[in-house]
Image (cartoon, rainbow, N blue to C red):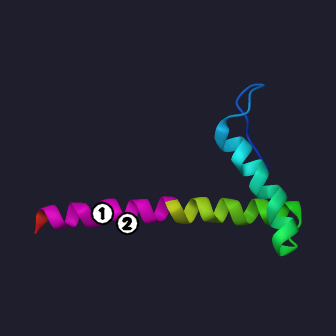
Amino acid sequence: MGLIEPEGTMLRPQDVTRIIQIIRLPQDLGLNLIGASMVLDMAQEIAQLKSQIQVLRQQNQVKD
């Protein structure tokens, strides 16, 4: 996965947000660009996993 993955020649709003975060992480935490990208990728994956857990919990409540 690259630092950003625009579609065509246009940046999406989430791309702009990611660029800002990639700039800030090295400044705030002393990470290099690859480290910042990895942190953001992991944060996105954690958010997706939390969302999946929430869906599974809701499905489990319906069965009870």
Residue situated in front as seen by the camera: 45 or 22: 22
Is 8 placed left or right of 63 in the picture?
right
Expressed as whole percent of the image width and height from the top left, the position of residue 60 reads 20, 66
Badge 1 density bin: few <14, some 14–19, many ≥20, Cα 10 Å:
few
Q: Judge left or right: residue 8 versus residue 62.
A: right
Q: Quadrant of residue 63?
A: bottom left
Q: Is residue 54 magenta?
A: yes
Question: Of all residues shown, which one is farthest toward the top?
Answer: 9
Which amino acid type corresponds to the residue marked 2 in the rendered image?
Ile
Q: Quadrant of residue 37?
A: bottom right
Instruction: Relative to 64, say whether 14 is above or below.
Output: above
Q: Which mark is residue 53?
A: 2
Distance, label 1 to label 2, CA atoms, is 5 Å
Residue 9, how many percent across, how many down?
78, 25
Query: Disc 1 designates what residue?
Result: 56
Residue 30 or residue 49, whichever sits in front: 30
Q: Is residue 36 above or below residue 15?
A: below
